[in-house]
Each structure stands twice: as C-alpha cells, then as structure tokens.
Amino acid sequence: MIFALINLALLLFVIANALTMPKLTRVSSSSRIVAIHVPMRNEAANVNELIEVLKSQDYKGDFHFYILDDNSTDNTYSLLEKAIAGDERFTLIRGSEPPVGWIGKTWALQQLFEASDEEIVISLDADVRISSDALTSAISTIEKYELDFLSIYPRQLVTSFGERMIQPLLQWSWLSTLLLRATMRSTNAAFAVANGQFFIVRRSALSGYQGVADQVLDDMQLARVLLSNGHKGSVVNGGAIAQCRMYSSFTELRAGYAKSLWKAFGSVLGSIVAIAFIFLTGIAPILLILTGSPWGWIAFELIVLSRVISASISNGKIVDSLLHPISSILLIYLIFYSWSVRKSVQWKGRTL
C-alpha cells in the first residue's frame, strides 16, 4: 500500500503542475537589450544549423550573439567564421584554457559574460534549436512572471531505446516533486530546478560564474546560488520554442550522465536515498504484481499515469510511459556507473 500512496503523491504533483505551472507567453512589447551566449567546443556538426536558426530571430528589441570557441580540436572555429560571414549581430571569440579551479563550460560562460554588457543574458547550448520567436517568448515570459532567472526546458528529441527510457525522466522528475507555481516566488535553494540548455537571467542578478566555477552540474548550482542570493526563478516547458538532441546513442548518453549523475544527489547518502526511491516507485510495484498483490497494479498504474501526463506536457512518446520500470532499472545502473568512473570522466576531450 505504501508504494501506491507514494506514487499517488507523485501523480498529484504532476496534475497540479499540469494545471498551474507557469507557461510561455509569446506577445511582448519589451525592448530589453539581450545578449545570447553560446559556448562551443568540438561542435562542427552543429555550426551551420545553429547559426541559421540564430539569424532567423525576430525579436524587436536590441540583441547580440556572442559565440565562443572553447579551444576546439576540430574545425568549429573556421566553420563559425564562414557561417557568420561578417554579420554584425555576432561576435566570435577564441576562448582561453580554463584556469585552476574552473571547468571548461563554466569558464567559457564566464568569458562570454565578461565580453558582453547587455541587461538580459541568455545562455544557449550548441545542440539546441530554437524557433524564430524564441527570444521574444523568453523575454516576455521572464517579464510576465517578474522573475530574475528562468530555465526554459527544450523538448528532448530521442530515438534510441536508451534515450527514450532515460531522457523523459528529466522533466518528469521536477514535475512530480515540485509545485512550480508555489516555488517560483520562493528563494529557498532547496527548490532549485534548472536546465542550462536554454537559460535566461538578468545581469543585475548575475555577477558572473565564480560561484559555480568547478561545478559539473553548473545549471542546478547556478539556480541554487541565485536563489540563495535572494533572486527568484522558475522553469517552464519550452517545447514549443526549443528542442534538443542531447545524445545520439546510449553510449553517448551513458558518457554524458557519467560526468554528472554522481553529483546530482549531493553525496553517497543522497544517491542511496535516490536509488531507494527509484526502486520503491518504479520497480517494487512490478515485484508486487508478480506476487499477486493488487497494490502492485495500483502503484504501477499511478506511476504510469504520471508519466503519461508528463509526456503529454513535453510532447514526448506516451507509449514509453508503460516502460517506466525499465527506465528505473537503467537510471539506477547509470547512478552506479557514474560513481564508478567519477575520477576518470572525460567530456569533449577534457578530464573533469
């Protein structure tokens, strides 16, 4: 029975968020001056398509793109030069190697921050694709809710079986554990939730990235720092204006999670608690079903329904919700794997 009650609570959180969570708005008369920061390392495959969608932005205020090549070992920089081709809306920067105490991503963001002075800063990952009205929507939404920062969650594109099992858990995790409408007015760092793929922040709230210099999960830690400093923020479903293909295979996905998942729960104890929670909500109901317990079926149906609603919100594959127990098994595996390789993790050719 306890499993069913836990899963019922998760379902109620998802329903409450589906009905009340902050939403993107697309109408704006804002004239905020905006800087769009894009750090890139070994992103040759993304250059042309990325620059094309950036050039298509129809925001009516002043804006400027700052692109930083973070010491790529491929031809990212030369491709950027060709794609930008003298467009005055772009500034192309050759990044320097990160100093002691910094990791590559946060040092790249710091250099971009120092190179710009616009009042609104948007950081965008190179594999994110945005619609022509994305800047307008982002600015009007942060203005509408009077926030200091906003994490716009792109639609996650998935094809391989491993991606389909794991990636939808990202959005489901915060939909099922936080009441976004209630927490968006709080400055309690415990309520932090963020995705750095598309992140917007007021410069008045951000003094730089020193506070997250060595953090692999820089987006979540940045949200915590901002909240701790008295600034307010939230997350919105941005599937209508942004999409992202983070990984192209389970091998890439495993490498990506290896660098950060061991940090996601704060400590060994936090990881143990997370594993126990994942087991109780996603795997134990199946074990109960095998013993003939009706509570197993109830718990399973509740967790699947929460996943169905989450998938509907995020334009995900609803049918994959039925495979939540497999998702749970794979996520537990990834947590163990991340801890096992944490001292030798490499990303984009750098050891973290």
Image: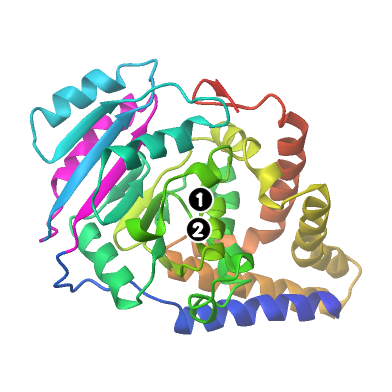
> Does residue 316 sit above or below 312 in this rendering?
above
Q: In terms of secondary structure, where does tag 1 sit?
A: helix
**Residue 140 in sight here:** yes
Q: Is residue 348 left or right of residue 96?
A: right
Alpha carbons under labels 2 and 1: distance apart: 6 Å
The reply to whether the magenta stretch includes residue 50 is: yes
> Does residue 152 sit above or below 264 in this rendering?
below
Location of the N terminus (image quadrant): bottom right
Residue under pointer 1? 219
Q: Are marks 2 and 1 in contact (CB under 8 Å)?
A: yes
The residue shown at (40%, 38%) is 110
Three-letter amino acid code of the residue under disc 2:
Ala
Q: Position of residue 204 (x, y in %)?
A: 35, 59
> Does residue 283 sit above or below 180 in this rendering?
above
Q: Is residue 57 left or right of residue 335?
A: left
Query: Which stretch appears magenta?
Result: 32-60
The residue shown at (54%, 46%) is 211
Q: Position of residue 31 (x, y in %)?
A: 14, 65
Three-letter amino acid code of the residue under disc 1:
Asp
